[in-house]
Image (cartoon, rainbow, N blue to C red):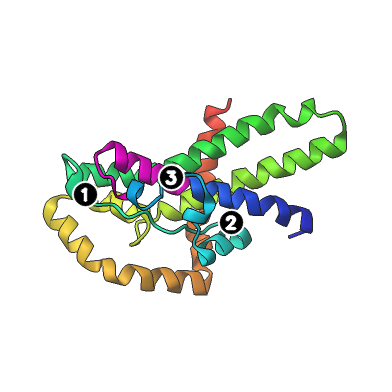
Amino acid sequence: MGIEQLLFSIPAVLFAISVHEFAHGMVAYRLGDPTAKYQGRLTLNPLAHMDPIGALMLLIFRFGWAKPVMVNPRYFADPRKGMIFVAIAGPLSNITLAWIFYLLFQFLPSLMPSFAVANTLAMFLVINLQLNLGLAAFNLLPLPPLDGSKVLAGMLPGRLSYQYEQLAQFGPILLILLLMTGSIQIILGPIRDFLFFVITGFGL
């Protein structure tokens, strides 16, 4: 990674994780849970959301995580459905951002006064696109404690949901093994490709 890419990636990472966690907190708040508000998480200030290791992973490998927003589902009228909405809000916010950066990439560089400026802007937009897709794809994995696991747990029938949640303690271990062996990239590749296909379809 060149110095220019690194300089662009840092604010892109901070913005992506801030929007992701803000989305979790805001949806929970709208559903009646004030926990995120009391903890100062209803903000786009990256200092409130950043997990140093997760942010570094996102910076280097284009996938990562932020400090989770605490949620109390007892405030929700329907706790299972509420948790699904809160969990999916984070990845959806990053997919939306990726779509916006893709749309901007289609026309904004061509409006720049010089090739150098256009090329620099295009690089910045692509980096934001990649980081948001990576953050969304990683968090959609159905492995605890990632968002995808909460969505799956909420969609499974009661008994299966309970059994799945009993396996949650092994989720972080499996996640670490996937990260250490590099197998995570094999899994994330098709997810990122599919998400890119989705946003480019909407961008036509």
The number of numbered discs placed on residues in the rendered structure image is: 3
Q: Is residue 34 above or below residue 186?
A: above
User: Which residue was labeled with disc 3?
Assistant: 22
Percent of width and height locating residue 151:
30, 49
Measuring 53% from the left and 57% from the top, which residue is drawn there? 63
Residue 191 visible from this viewpoint: no
Q: Earlier in the sequence, mark 1 or mark 2?
A: 2
Q: Residues within 10 Å of mark 1 (few under 14, many from 20)?
A: some
Q: Callout 2, which amino acid?
A: Arg
What is the three-letter code of the residue carrying label 1?
Pro
Quadrant occupied by the N terminus: bottom right
Height in image: 151 above or below 146?
above
Residue placed most toward the observer, 39 or 28: 39
Regarding mark 1 in the picture, which secondary structure is present there? Answer: helix
Give the left or right position of residue 77, taking residue 123 as reference: left
Disc 3 secondary structure class: helix
| Residue 81: x %, y % from top left | 22, 42
Q: Could you tell me the amino acid type at mark 3? A: Phe
Query: Which label belongs to residue 33?
Result: none
Task: Specify the segment rendered in magenta.
Answer: 19-35
Q: Is residue 198 left or right of residue 73?
A: right
Q: CA distance from mark 3 to mark 1?
A: 17 Å
| Residue at the outermost left position | 159
Q: Main secondary structure of the magenta part?
A: helix
Pointer 2 residue: 62
Determine whether, in the image, residue 119 is placed left or right of residue 141: right
Residue topped by disc 1:
73
Residue at position x 33%, y 40% from top? 27
Residue 112 sits inside the magenta stretch: no
Number of other residues with Cα within 10 Å of mark 3, as a class: few under 14, some 14 to 19, many 20 or more: many
